[in-house]
Structures are given as C-alpha cells and as structure tokens.
Amino acid sequence: MTALAEEVAPVAYKPVSEPGSDLDEVLWQAWKAMDLPEGYRAEIIEGSIEVSPTGRRRHTVLIGRLRRLLDAHLTGSGYAVHNDGNVIHRQKAWVPDLFVAPLDLDEIPDEDGLGVDAAGVEMVVEVTSPGHRNLQRDRVRKCREYARAGIPVYVIIDDFDDEGAVLVLTSPDPKKAKYADEHRVPYGTDAVIPEGPAKGFAVGKAIVGS
C-alpha cells in the first residue's frame, strides 16, 4: 500500500437490516446450502435463485481490460476493484462482474460472513452476455435490485445494445427500484463515471474496442 493510501480515512458505511419475507428466508437458506461446480455462480434475484456459468472469451477480455485500467485509476484512493465476490443486501445475493469498494473488504462484512454488505459498495459493473434471459437479468432485474440496495453507480457494458453501448446509471431510488439518472453512450465515445471513487474514469475504446 502506498503512503497516500495509508492516509485515507476509514470508509464509513451503514448496513441496513430489515426483516424479509418467508420466501426470502427460504431462498436465503437454500442459496447458502448450494454447492456449485467450478465455473458457475448462484444469485438471488427478485424472488428466485439464478445459476449462470462464467462468461465467454469476449466477456473475460472486457472485464480484464476494465479491471486493469480502473485499478490504476483508483490507486491511492483507499478503494479497489473486486470480482468473484458476493454482494449481500437483505437476504439477496449478487455476484457482479466487478464492483468498487474499500481496498480492505473486511471494512464492510455482511452479517453472515458470506460476502460484503451492499451498503459499502460504491459501484457495480455488469458486462452483458448473449441471450434474452441474460440480457434481461443485467438490464432489468439486477438494475432494480442494485437500485433497491442504493448502490450509487451501476455501469452496464452492453455489446448487444445496437452496435454496442455503455449505460451509466446513478441516483438510485430504493423505494421505486430504479435509477433516476441514465446516461447511454454508444461504443466509440467515452462514457465517464460522474461520481464516487471512480469519478472521471472513462469507459472507452481502450476497453470495448472500436
């Protein structure tokens, strides 16, 4: 860790705990008991457990490019890019392709020790995969879930939106389960993150290509 990073004040967060429904509890217990084969992940999304495989080559390439550049952008900020981790909110569990949170995830544990509390996550990123259900998951269902959790910034890198586009969503409204501000940028133009630790970071040609 650099000297600058050591001088950053601890990140404050407020976990929110509310009782869930009986279905939430059943799904939560079933999800915790799952033992998936390597290469698969399970998430609790809007009242169901969804199991999906890891992404194809293009998916992996985009995530790798984004992570390397975003990690460099966050150097010294006290934040880092994380992946392959559970983000937990009120007996819901998601595995974003990438998320931005404190460098030390021990600062934002969830109550059951299964992942990190969504209250401490500043940004989530999803790279879409082909297929109607996959696209609806990232564009619609997870969009509502991340808004309900109050995650400040949600970025969707979408190869299947016309010729490709980046959607930057901000100003979550948990009660309405939607983001108030949406900024769609076609591939070939930089999509700039407007707030949070990644403020000023551009998702452009270096990540998505021409």
Image (tube, rainbow, N blue to C red):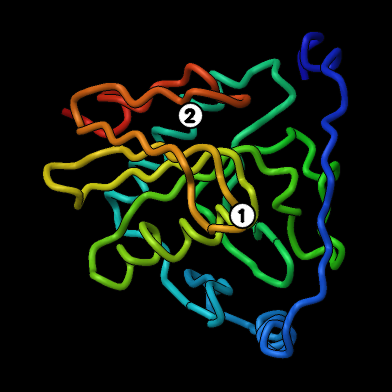
Residue shown at 30%/59% (left/top)? Answer: 129
Of the two numbered discs 1 and 2 in the rendering, the one whose residue sits closer to the viewer: 1
Circle 1 residue: 174
Describe residue 131's horizontal placement relative to residue 1 as left or right: left
Badge 1 local density, few (<14 within 10 Å), some, or many (20+)? Answer: some
- Mark sitting on residue 99: none
Disc 2 element: helix
Q: Does 21 sit above or below residue 145?
A: below
Splitting the image into 4 quarters, where does residue 17 fall?
bottom right
**Mark 1 vs 2, N-terminal side:** 2
Residue shown at 82%/68% (left/top)? Answer: 18
Horizontal and vertical percent for residue 153? 53, 38
Residue type marked 1: Pro
Horizontal and vertical percent for residue 166? 31, 38
The Cα–Cα distance between marks 1 and 2, rounded to whole angstroms, is 31 Å
Describe residue 65's horizontal placement relative to residue 149 as left or right: left
Horizontal and vertical percent for residue 56? 30, 58
Splitting the image into 4 quarters, where does residue 85 fall?
bottom right
Badge 2 local density, few (<14 within 10 Å), some, or many (20+)? Answer: few
